[in-house]
Image: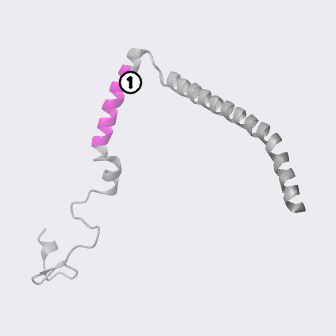
Amino acid sequence: MIVEQDPRRPGSRYQGSQYQAPPHGYSENRPSSLRRVLGGSPAAVFLRLLFLSILVGAFMAMLGLTPARLFWHAYDTVRALVDLGLEAFHDFGGWIIAGAVVVVPLWLISRLFAVSK
């Protein structure tokens, strides 16, 4: 725009024949924050998501999948992994207790002999 390049305008970057650099991080062609977050204009992103949702929904319908089945399958999988992990910690805790039954009394005895010297 000609108005932005007018050297007579107060605060213009074009003071006489000298050019003032824009502030750090400023760009005239920089997209808005909303466009940067969405990855494009809101309308274009909405249309892309709508189209992909239709395709994925049709594919899921052909396979006989429903969102509820997917949710419960994911829930069962996570629950099985948690149960497996807790079972491993249960075994690990047993090892700790079994080792402590032997190690702690030996440590106490060694400390008592070290203090008596």
Residue closer to the observer: 81 or 111: 111
> What residue did someone put label 1 on?
57
* Residue 114 position in % (x across, y down): 84, 59
Q: Secondary structure at mark 1?
A: helix
Q: Residue furthest left?
A: 17
Q: Residue at x 13, y 74 (%)?
A: 5
Residue 33: name its quadrant.
bottom left
Q: In the picture shown, does residue 68 fall above or below 93?
A: above
Main secondary structure type of the part rendered in magenta: helix
Residue closer to the observer: 23 or 100: 100
* Quadrant of the image containing the C terminus: bottom right
Q: Is residue 46 magenta?
A: yes
* Residue 63 position in % (x across, y down): 41, 15
* Residue 88 position in % (x across, y down): 66, 32
Q: In the picture shown, does residue 62 fall above or below 41?
A: above
Q: Residue furthest right?
A: 116
Q: Is residue 30 magenta?
A: no
Residue closer to the observer: 109 or 7: 109
The mark tally for this picture is: 1
Describe residue 66's horizontal placement relative to residue 109 as left or right.
left
Q: In the picture shown, does residue 35 fall above or below 96?
A: below
Residue 94: name its quadrant.
top right
Describe residue 11's horizontal placement relative to residue 46 as left or right.
left
Q: Amino acid at mark 1?
A: Gly
Describe residue 104's horizontal placement relative to residue 28 as left or right.
right
Residue 97: name its quadrant.
top right
The residue stretch that appears in magenta: 44-59
